[in-house]
Amino acid sequence: MSRRDQYLSKRESGFNTRFGINANLSTYNALYDPSMRHFFENRGVQSHLYRTGQIDKAGRVIDLDLNKSKLMIIEKEFRNAERNESSRQKEEEEMRRRVQLKRHQALDKARKEEKLIRIKEDRKIRQEIVMATREAQGLIVPSVKTKKKKVTMKKK
């Protein structure tokens, strides 16, 4: 190692590169930098900043740290609104399901009643056919059905 290399190595060993690691530096925001003002006055840049929510309509910078609580409240309201909407939709679907079930039950009941009426009519027709066949063969003598009146005795 040459004398010059020894000198440079000694000189570098005294140089502290860890100085800035523990120092608390303030955060930099280019929107507040006066040197960048000419850049942010451009209309295209301002419309982009407005769309992304970094400035308001008047061109004032929106401090997100200060407005974080407002944003949280708005986000919470959106979540609640979404939750309410989904529960309303579930209730509506359940109501539709119940109505549809009742309609199916009513249709089934009407079909069963209609089927029962047809069965009774068919039975009545069959009985009439059997009676007519028996009468034609002379097995049964037709009789007229009359209702019997109840006779009550009066006490004296």
Image (cartoon, grey):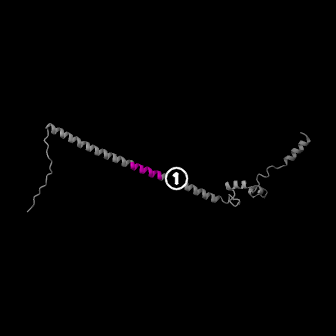
- Three-letter amino acid code of the residue under disc 1: Ser
Residue stretch rendered in magenta on the structure: 92-103
Residue nearer the viewer, 126 or 20: 126
- Residue depicted at 44% across the width and 52% down the height: 95
Q: Quadrant of the C terminus?
A: bottom left
Q: Which residue is mark 1?
A: 86
Q: Which quadrant holds residue 25?
A: bottom right
Residue 96 x, y percent position in the rendering: 44, 51
Residue 101 vertical placement versus 34 (above, below): above
Residue 68 vertical placement versus 6 (above, below): below
Of helix, strand and loop, which one carries label 1? helix
Residue 4 vertical placement versus 73 (above, below): above
- Residue depicted at 36% across the width and 46% down the height: 108
Observer able to see residue 27: no
Q: Was residue 93 drawn as part of the magenta stretch in this picture? A: yes
Residue 97 x, y percent position in the rendering: 44, 49
Residue nearer the viewer, 116 or 16: 116
